[in-house]
């Protein structure tokens, strides 16, 4: 079963547009939406498992220029 998560991202001032463009290129990212207020970007991902989610967050999202902080929320199946 796939792992789905919402990732809330804080981005440095002036970097949101570029960060969103980079986020949308990451495999597994279904949505990357810039928003007013904090956090700056809401991302929805669907990947194979929690290890793949960890890889997306740590190896891909955290390396994007301007990303300062992430807050990951794994979707609970009801």
Image (cartoon, rainbow, N blue to C red):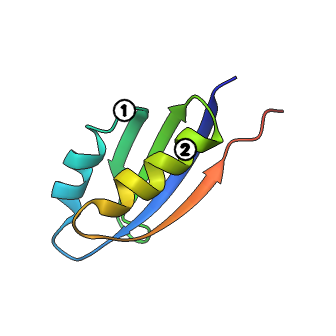
Instruction: Locate the N terminus and report the quarter of the image it occupies.
Output: top right
Q: Secondary structure at mark 2?
A: helix
Of 77 and 59, the residue lying toward us:
59
Find residue 74 and report its horizontal and vertical position in percent: 66, 47
Q: How many discs mark residues in the rendered view? A: 2
The reply to whether dot 2 and dot 1 touch (C-beta < 8 Å) is no
Of 43 and 37, the residue lying toward us:
43
Instruction: Specify the quadrant of the image occupied by residue 4.
Output: top right
* Among numbered discs 2 and 1, the one appearing first in the sequence: 1
Q: Residue at x 76, y 40 (%)?
A: 76
Crowding at dot 1, Cα within 10 Å, few <14 / some 14-19 / many 20+, comes out as: few
* Disc 2 to disc 1, C-alpha distance: 11 Å
Crowding at dot 2, Cα within 10 Å, few <14 / some 14-19 / many 20+, comes out as: many
Horizontally, is 3 left or right of 63 in the view?
A: right
Relative to 30, does residue 55 appear above or below in the rendering? below
Q: Residue at x 39, y 37 (%)?
A: 31
Q: Which residue is mark 1?
A: 27
Residue furthest right as drawn: 78
Find residue 17 and report its horizontal and vertical position in percent: 18, 56
Horizontally, is 72 left or right of 34 in the view?
A: right
Q: Which residue is mark 2?
A: 53
Relative to 77, does residue 39 appear above or below in the rendering? below
Find residue 49 and report its horizontal and vertical position in percent: 63, 34
Find residue 72 and report its horizontal and vertical position in percent: 58, 57
Q: Secondary structure at mark 1?
A: loop
Instruction: Locate the C terminus and report the quarter of the image it occupies.
Output: top right
């Amino acid at each position: 079963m796939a792992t789905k998560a919402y990732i809330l991202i804080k981005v440095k001032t002036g970097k949101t547009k570029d960060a969103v463009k980079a986020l949308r290129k990451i495999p597994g990212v279904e949505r990357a939406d810039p928003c007013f207020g904090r956090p700056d970007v809401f991302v929805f991902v669907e990947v194979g498992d929690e290890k793949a989610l960890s890889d997306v967050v740590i190896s891909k999202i955290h390396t994007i220029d301007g990303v300062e902080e992430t807050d990951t929320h794994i979707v609970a199946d009801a």
